[in-house]
Image: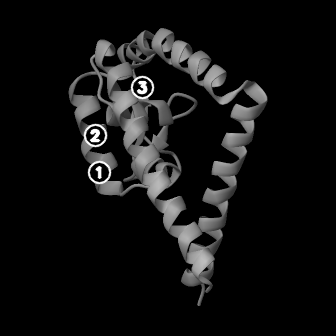
Amino acid sequence: MSREQQDALSRTALGVFRLNGQFLGVSEKLAEPAGLTAAWWQVLGAVLPEPLPVAGIARAMGITRQSVQRIADLLVERGLAAYEPNPAHRRAKLLTPTPEGRAAIRRIDPGHADLAERLTRELGGLEAFEETVRVLERLSRALEALEALEEAP
């Protein structure tokens, strides 16, 4: 590996770590008026389109099943989500948002829309924003491919 490649990897990692911290901070501010944390919002958001098992949520978000389980249990305790039977797996119940959970997410929408608009302007328009998304998705897919190669027998 060349020095330039190592530097590029280091700069990428540090940039993503910083970006993660920035997104967490912004997300906490956006979620607070809805009575949520960024982590609660993240888990609820994962099950808005369809109910998922905790392990499926963890895989989609790239975090541990145990951390998702703790958050899911808290959401259920607070009436923001519920567990329902999983026809595909008797023990791995599906997490689904309750009407209260969906209402909490809707309370985030105005701030979320405002941030999206301001960030689009700051990045120089929707095309530039979409290119940023494509680059991040490409980086994620590349890392997934490398992980799969390392795990293959």
Tell me the residue that label 2 is attached to: 71
* Residue name at image x 43 percent, y 15 percent: 108
Residue nearest the observer in this picture, 62 or 68: 62
Give the colour scheme shown: one colour
Q: Residues within 10 Å of mark 3 (few under 14, many from 20)?
A: many
Q: Amino acid at mark 2?
A: Ile
Do we see residue 84 in this rendering?
no
* Residue name at image x 32 percent, y 28 percent: 28
Q: In which quadrant of the rendered view does residue 132 lie? A: top right
- Pointer 3 with pointer 1, Cβ within 8 A: no
Q: Amino acid at mark 3?
A: Pro
Q: How many marks?
A: 3
Which comes sooner in the sequence, label 2 or label 3? 2
Numbered disc 2: secondary structure: helix
Numbered disc 3: secondary structure: strand
Q: Residues within 10 Å of mark 2 (few under 14, many from 20)?
A: some
Q: Amino acid at mark 1?
A: Ser
Judge left or right: residue 88 versus residue 128. left
Q: Which quarter shows the C terminus?
A: bottom right
Tell me the residue that label 1 is attached to: 67
Do we see residue 68 in this rendering?
yes
- Pointer 2 with pointer 3, Cβ within 8 A: no
* Residue name at image x 39 percent, y 29 percent: 27
Numbered disc 1: secondary structure: helix
Q: Which mark is residue 140?
A: none
- Pointer 2 with pointer 1, Cβ within 8 A: yes
* Residue name at image x 56 percent, y 33 percent: 50
How far across and how far down the image is residue 114, in percent? 53, 12
Which comes sooner in the sequence, label 3 or label 1? 1
Residue nearest the observer in this picture, 31 or 56: 31
Tell me the residue that label 3 is attached to: 97
Mark 2 to mark 1 CA distance (whole Å): 6 Å
